[in-house]
């Protein structure tokens, strides 16, 4: 059966004729989708979506001789929409990341200011533990104090930091 007869049959609701038309166009549609979306999985999804849209709107096709052009246009429109959607998602993610980085910097500054308000021995313990990533034993050896004393000082320092940060509105720290 030639393409024109298949298109006319598909417009009348013949899904088998539509499947045959789609089979003829499948390779071309795949190449187009792959060139836009750069991903095999997304290209296959684009073919599926294009087939759905074409089947849904086949009765609106005015001139059956332009079926190939018509379905290609549906594919291109879908791919362009998908590319815009992916760019928007990417932009949203990066702006959220920027907001998160700013909040992290603000929190870090508040934390550093709070540490500066501690007495010197507690400052030293916090810096060694959380900024230098030393263990309690390593800190004890570095400041020549028993591990129990280091634990007590660390507990006192953390308590004071929590109080200072709570006053500034950072209850979640």
Image (tube, helix red, strand yellow):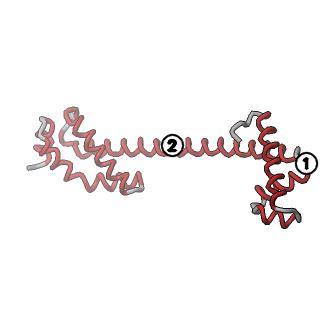
The dot on residue 51 is none
Q: Secondary structure at mark 2?
A: helix
- Where residue 41 appears, x then y in whole percent? 36, 54
In this rendering, position of residue 24 left or right of residue 161: left
- Report the residue at 53% width, 46% height from top: 90
Q: Nearer the viewer, residue 6 or 40?
A: 40
- Where residue 8 appears, x then y in whole percent? 12, 39
Q: Secondary structure at mark 1?
A: loop
Question: Quick check: marks 2 and 1 in contact, CB under 8 Å?
Answer: no
Within 10 angstroms of label 1, few (less than 14), some, or many (20 or more) residues? few
Residue 121 is drawn in which quadrant? bottom right
Question: Considering the image in quadrants, where does the C terminus appear?
Answer: top right
* Mark in the foreground, 2 or 1: 1
Label 1, on which residue?
119
Residue 73 is drawn in which quadrant? top left
- Report the residue at 30% width, 49% height from top: 47
- Where residue 53 appears, x then y in whole percent? 27, 39
Label 2, on which residue?
89
Q: Nearer the viewer, residue 117 or 149?
A: 149
- Report the residue at 36% width, 42% height from top: 78
């Amino acid at each position: 059966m030639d393409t024109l007869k298949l298109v006319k049959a598909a417009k009348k609701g013949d899904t088998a004729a539509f499947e045959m038309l789609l089979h003829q166009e499948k390779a071309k549609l795949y190449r187009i989708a792959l060139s836009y979306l750069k991903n095999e999985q997304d290209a296959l999804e684009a073919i599926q979506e294009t087939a759905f849209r074409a089947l849904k709107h086949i009765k609106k096709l005015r001139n059956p001789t332009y079926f190939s052009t018509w379905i290609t246009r549906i594919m291109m429109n879908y791919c362009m929409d998908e590319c815009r959607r992916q760019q928007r998602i990417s932009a949203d993610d990066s702006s959220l990341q920027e907001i998160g980085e700013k909040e992290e910097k603000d929190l870090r500054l508040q934390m550093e200011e709070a540490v500066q308000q501690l007495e010197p021995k507690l400052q030293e313990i916090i810096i060694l533990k959380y900024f230098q990533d030393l263990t309690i034993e390593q800190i004890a050896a570095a400041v020549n104090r028993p591990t129990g004393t280091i634990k007590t000082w660390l507990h006192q320092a953390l308590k004071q930091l929590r109080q200072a940060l709570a006053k500034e509105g950072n209850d979640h720290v």
